[in-house]
Amino acid sequence: ISKTSDLYQILCNLDVEATQDEADVLFRYLDEDGDGLLDFEDFLPWYLDAAAAATAVAESFQSLLVGRRTIEEFDRTPVSNDVLIRAVQCALAAPNRSCSEPWRFIHVGPQTVARFA
């Protein structure tokens, strides 16, 4: 690999999400001897580490999905509006058998929480 644009194309072909700027930085990082060339031995260890990290994230996410549970006991821990908005966004993006189980969200204040906690 002699150009950062070549590295960028390789990353795209491997479904690695990266911008051209990120490919430029990666090229300079992997080109340890500074000769402007990357060979397979320069690239492979980085790619294997990146693939292992992506696999670990995917397995962690799968474990989270499989292990999720409905919570019916509540505490008084405050939840920020940013967290609530992100939760609603994730819920709306989640699969739902032809909308046969519609989502319902209720945002309650501290007085209501105090009555149920």
Image: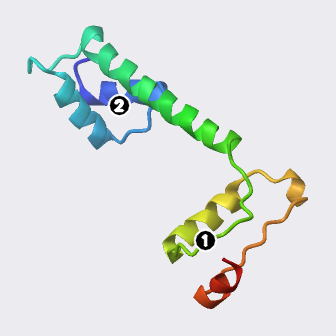
* Mark 2 Cα-neighbour bin, 10 Å: few <14, some 14–19, many ≥20: many
Residue for point 70% across, 66% down:
73
Q: Position of residue 117 (x, y in %)?
A: 66, 77
Decide which of tag 2 and tag 1 comes sooner along the chain.
2
Of labels 2 and 1, the one closer to you: 1
Q: In the image, is 4 to the left or to the right of 14?
A: left
Number of numbered discs: 2
Badge number at residue 27: none
> Which image quadrant for residue 6?
top left
Q: Position of residue 83 (x, y in %)?
A: 53, 68
Residue for point 44% across, 32% down:
16
Q: Nearer the viewer, residue 117 or 16?
A: 117
> Which image quadrant for residue 99?
bottom right
Q: In the image, is 72 to the left or to the right of 46?
A: right
Q: Nearer the viewer, residue 8 or 104?
A: 104
The answer to whether residue 57 shows anywhere in this view is yes
For residue 24, above or below residue 69: above
Badge number at residue 75: 1
Could you say whether the residue bearing mark 1 is in a helix, strand or loop?
loop
Q: Amino acid at mark 2?
A: Tyr
What residue did someone put label 2 on?
8
Q: Quadrant of the N terminus?
A: top left
Q: Position of residue 81 (x, y in %)?
A: 52, 76
> Which image quadrant for residue 105?
bottom right
- Looking at this rendering, what residue extends furthest in the bottom direction? 111
